[in-house]
Amino acid sequence: MRSIAARRRGLDIWPGFVDALTSLIMVLVFVLMLFAIGQFVLSDSLAGKNRALDDLNARVAELARTLSLAEGARNRLDAQVKELSASLGTTTGERDQARTELMAAQAEAARLTTDIAALAQLKSQLESEVARLANELGLSQTEVVKGKELSAQQLAQVELLNRQMAALNAQLAQIQAALDAANKDVKAKDVKIAELGKELNLALANRVSELERYRSEFFGRLRAALGDRADIRVVGDRFVVPTDILFDTASAELGPTAQASMDKLAETVKLVAAEIPSNLDWVLRIDGHTDARPIHTDRFPSNWELSSARAVSIVKYLVVQGIPAHRLSANGFGQFQPLDAAQTPDAFARNRRIEIQLTNR
């Protein structure tokens, strides 16, 4: 009986052992599946990162090529800037030399003109004297022909008159030769002055065209800084800003909003001034304009004082912001340069303005 019971207990343990072993195998299979799935996910992630790394390396290579091209372009631009600077220096020297020669030629031409006038006056006097002596000589010779007796003194006087006439004729010939030479010299000087004038005008045109490029850049940056407003516009070579957005009525004080606009103007001037060559003499003109309605206050007896005070206020503010004073100019024109001659509120608003001009000194 004991043997049968022991056998039964052994039979009862075996199924539990098999179940435990099966569970363990299932757990191992599950762990292996998780490991396989993780391995797959990790491999896919690494492959994606490798692809991203390849793309990044390709972009780096492309950026390196672009940087190399940009560096080459910058070197070429630097060389071109140096050539243009050298050319500008040569042009400036030629212009100054041409201006000096032109002034000297004009002074020489003025001197020659004065000499010619003096010689012409002397010639006229000598011709009058010759005519008088010829008349006297003719009378004396007529008396000889008529057989009148002449005294020794009269004969000597006739001989003296003949010698004087010969000397005067010789002097007249010398004066005429001098006049011809002077006229020829004046013509040559006129030709030289014309040539120097053309060279000077060409040099000035080159300087104006060079400043025009910076003026266009200045206007573009200033418009971007002040905002794309319909009432702020470019008229010719001037940037026109309505005074209504800068000053109160009958006032020349810049408010907080106007000061913010002037800060942007100062920054724009600094940026453009840093690009303008040092040998290009420029100035920023601030011109104040009012409408035609009169003003009579203790501080502003007329629109002259109001427009001038507004321009001066802007210039002083720009100086505080770091703009060199010798690069600024304040001007007041009152109501005497209107953009619109009509006597309407819209015309008055257009004429109340501040004009900003980047120009040669």
Image: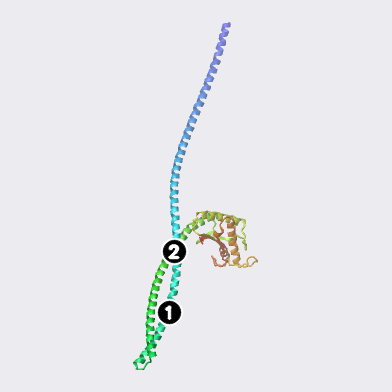
Mark 1: secondary structure:
helix
Q: Residue furthest front?
A: 152
- Give the class, few, some or many, for how many residues have Cα within 10 Å of label 2's Cα (few <14, many ≥20): many
Instruction: Using a 10 Å C-alpha cutoff, classify the residue at mark 1 as few (fewer than 14 neighbours), some (14 to 19) or many (20 or more).
Output: some
| C-alpha span from label 2 to label 1 | 35 Å
Residue at 52%, 24% (x, y): give it. Answer: 31
Instruction: Mark 2 vs mark 1: give the one in front.
Output: 1
Horizontally, residue 114 falls left or right of residue 322, namely: left
Q: How is the image coloured?
A: rainbow
Q: Quick one: 353 or 152, which is closer to the camera?
A: 152
Give the x, y percent position of residue 343.
57, 67
Q: Quadrant of the N terminus?
A: top right
Contact between labelled residues 1 and 2, with CB atoms less than 8 Å apart: no
Q: Residue at x 60, y 64 (%)?
A: 306
Q: Earlier in the sequence, mark 2 or mark 1?
A: 2
- Residue at mark 1: 122
Disc 2 on helix, strand or loop?
A: helix
Q: Is residue 147 above or below residue 19?
A: below
For residue 238, which numbered disc appears in the image? none
The type of residue carrying mark 1 is: Leu
User: Would residue 214 be seen by someone viewing this image from the given angle?
Assistant: yes
Q: Is residue 66 above or below residue 219?
A: above
Residue, disc 2: 98
Residue 225 found in image quarter: bottom right
Residue at the top extreme, as displayed: 1
Q: Position of residue 95 (x, y in %)?
A: 45, 62
| Residue 54 horizontal/vertical position (percent) | 45, 37
Q: Is there any visible trace of residue 227 in the rendered image?
A: no
Name the spot of residue 316 as percent of width and height, x first.
59, 59
